[in-house]
Amino acid sequence: MTSMVELRRKSILLTGYLEYLIKHYYTEDQAQPHKPHVHIITPSDPQQRGCQLSLSFSVPIRRVFQELERRGVVSDMG
């Protein structure tokens, strides 16, 4: 049986990994001003953000939603 401590540990790892990937691949690049980028609004401290990341995109959200859907991700813009 899984405990809440184990679930929280995994949550911190998964959210941290997503944060790492976004910062690695989608940080704003002054050398490539037209490259899409993502800004993480949520605090970096896992104790302040819980298990989610709030994001702001440099491209229209509709394009992001359509690309996620094309890749099989179920999401909701509502």
Image (cartoon, rainbow, N blue to C red):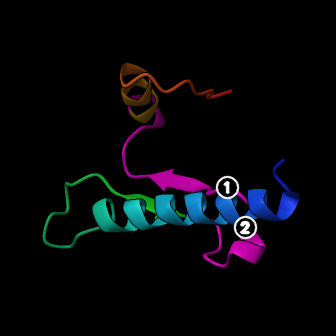
Real-space Cα separation, disc 2 to disc 1, in angstroms: 6 Å
The residue labelled by disc 2 is 49
* For residue 40, side relative to residue 70 (left or right): right
- Which disc, if any, is residue 34? none
Which quadrant is the C terminus positioned in?
Answer: top right
Q: Are marks 2 and 1 in contact (CB under 8 Å)?
A: yes
Q: Is residue 57 above or below residue 10?
A: above
Q: Measuring from the top left, give residue 11's x and y in whole percent.
A: 68, 58
Residue, far front = 1
> Which residue appears at 45% of the width and 29% of the height?
62
Foreground pick, 5 / 21 = 5
Mark 2 element type: helix
The residue labelled by disc 1 is 52
The quadrant in which residue 48 appears is bottom right
Which span is picked out in magenta?
A: 42-63
Q: Is residue 2 magenta?
A: no
